[in-house]
Image (cartoon, grey):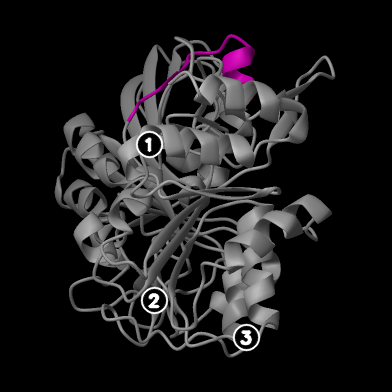
Amino acid sequence: MQRTSPPGAAALVRLRDTLALPLGPGIPGAFLHALGERDDFAALTVSCGLLLDWFELFTRPGVRLLSGFYGPIERALRDGGHDVHFVPADFRRFMTVLEAFAPRVMATTAAPPDAGGWLSLSLHAGATLPELRRCGRDRERLLIVETNPALPRTLGLPPEHSHRLHVDEIDVLIESDRPLFELPDPPPTDLDRAIAAHALAYVAEGSTLQTGIGTIPSAIASLLAAGPGGDYGVHSEMFTTGLMHLHRAGKVSNRKGVFDGVSVCTFALGTRELHEWLDGQEAVRFLPVGVVNAPEVIARNRQMISVNGALAVDLAGQVAADTVAGRQHSGVGGHEDFVGATGNSLAERSLVCLPSTTTTKDGRRISRLVAGFGADMLVTTPRHQVDVVITEFGAAELFGRTVDERAEALAAVAHPDFRDELHAAARFR
């Protein structure tokens, strides 16, 4: 193993090369910033997703970014005319996409090595560990690990899911003290609280929870933490500050039927408080996305309740959650996995939550519930997997209903300004 500086590691990348990085919190920022100081690449292709910082690297000639999940940075790079492209795949299949890509160079973040030389992969288990190990074993490839003392030392479930690398498995070790990205936990708005209140009616004591990103899932977790219920389990792609509060309130028992005794996730995003709480935290375990998001594993949980967002829903019940007007906005992630795997018993519910309206750049209010999707709107989750759609005006239960009944139920939870036209459209289905 070679110890070097971020610029030293960046110098090891060839003029024509392939590089793969994990999603979001697993991306080694100091290494990427050092790569961005170079302007000599002839053909560097980088595969990753959900950039959490602005990297000059992706503005350089000869650099191509392949992203499996867009965030604000990817959208800004695309809008600026840079060479960024979306790779459609759900989060589980990132593992196969990465194996097919077979990059010469891989890089990831990790907590500093412990006394035995083990590096916890910290905030990201995701889709990369098998390929990281393959890369480290191959003398023709290069495995770079960036450590940071601010990264929490998180745990997997050994021996099968160790969530760590040994210094002997890697080629290059670099150190960084860059501040970690923090996802704020802002107080919920009145609209968030209204949606969360409708959602709480579906969360019974003893439920196993999956929550996505955003203020609405956070508001739901906060209300559950302050409420009278408990005995919850957590099986979630993403671990959030809200789920930490649920733990701290003593509401999580994890008697859920699979991975009992611990909350499981595949990555975490949140506040510094969350990072500090996760350090050495035995109640939360990080597992590969192929395990956490596997529908057959999700379905084994007791009273599974999934809570996810959407950008729009049409009267057929189709959900658009990753594109806006034909342009990539985010990614597929685990949306369909958790929506589709929940509902194997009447006690299990899948909740798709969204505000009833949004405002365009020119100040117009438009409905997020629409009669039908046009050619420029792409479906993230098909209608037959959607159970309950919730807005601030109530919950539309779709499971087991006819197409006409579903359309009427969705129109009923639209904003009053759009409700009549949607009811009229529903009657002609």
Q: Earlier in the sequence, mark 2 or mark 3?
A: 2
User: Disc 3 marks which amino acid?
Assistant: Arg
| Left or right: 119 as drawn, with respect to 414 | left
Q: Counting residues from the N terminus, which is met first, the one under dot 1 or under dot 2?
A: 2
Pointer 2 local density, CA inside 10 Å: few below 14, some 14–19, many at least 20? many
Residue 390: image location, x then y, percent: 58, 49
The residue to which callout 2 is attached is: 155
Query: Residue 64: x and y, percent?
Result: 43, 18
Q: Which x, y percent locates residue 277? A: 60, 79
Q: Quadrant of the N terminus?
A: bottom left
Callout 1 secondary element: loop
Outermost residue on the front side: it is 427
Question: Is the Cβ of the residue at disc 1 closer than 8 Å to that at disc 2?
Answer: no
Q: Which callout, 3 or 1, points to the residue nearer the camera?
A: 1
255, 70: nearer the viewer: 255
- Residue at left offset 51%, top offset 10%: 61
Does 423 sit left or right of 282 as displayed?
A: right
Q: Residues within 10 Å of mark 1 (few under 14, many from 20)?
A: many
Give yes or no for contact between labels 2 and 3 (Cβ–Cβ under 8 Å): no
Question: What's the residue type where badge 1 is placed?
Answer: Thr
* Mark closer to the chain start, 3 or 1: 3
The part of the chain drawn in magenta is 75-88
Instruction: Look at mark 3 in the image and give the residue it sits on.
Output: 248
In terms of depth relative to the viewer, which is nearer, 251 or 247? 251
**195 versus 155 height, above or below:** above
Q: Nearer the viewer, residue 370 or 193?
A: 370
Q: Marks 2 and 3, how far apart in space?
A: 18 Å
Instruction: Give the amino acid at mark 2.
Output: Leu
Relative side of 154 to 396, left or right: left
